[in-house]
Image: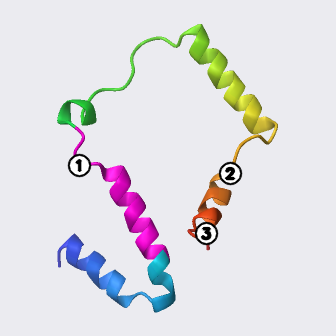
Amino acid sequence: MTTRESVHRLVDDLPQDELIRAERVLAALLATADASLPPALRDASGDDEPETPEERAAVEKALRDVEQGRTTSHGDVKRRWGLAE
């Protein structure tokens, strides 16, 4: 059985009340798969330049935001989109 066939079987076996959640998960996967991305960008190596003072300041600000509760947790996002159990 191919992977595609296995995924189809899993979807076919899902209870009716889980289909909406499955559709959202698969749509999110499809959105992030972006097959139209040019190979040069898709296969590009990671950033090898040193961090600038501005980038360092942005990271520090982001960490402060997390510490002070000015962010949305992954769990909250999942609940908002109906993906949490």
Element carrying mark 2: loop
Q: Which residues are magenta?
A: 21-37
Query: In this figure, which residue is indicated by the disc labeled 3?
Result: 84
| x 39%, y 16%: residue | 48
Residue 2, how many percent across, how many down? 17, 74
Determine whether, in the image, residue 63 is placed left or right of residue 37.
Answer: right
Looking at the picture, tell me which residue is in the foreground, 9 or 37: 37
| Image position, residue 63 (x, y; %) | 71, 30
Q: In percent of the image, x 73 and y 38: which residue is there?
A: 66
x then y, percent, for residue 23: 41, 73
Report helix, strand or loop for mark 3.
loop
Marks 3 and 1 sit apart, C-alpha to C-alpha, by: 27 Å
Q: Which mark is residue 73?
A: 2
Q: Is residue 76 left or right of residue 39?
A: right
Residue 13 falls within the magenta-colored stretch? no
Give the residue type at disc 2.
Answer: Ser
Residue at label 1?
Answer: 35
Query: Which residue is pictured at 37% across the width and 51% down the height?
Result: 32
**Which quarter of the figure has residue 84?**
bottom right
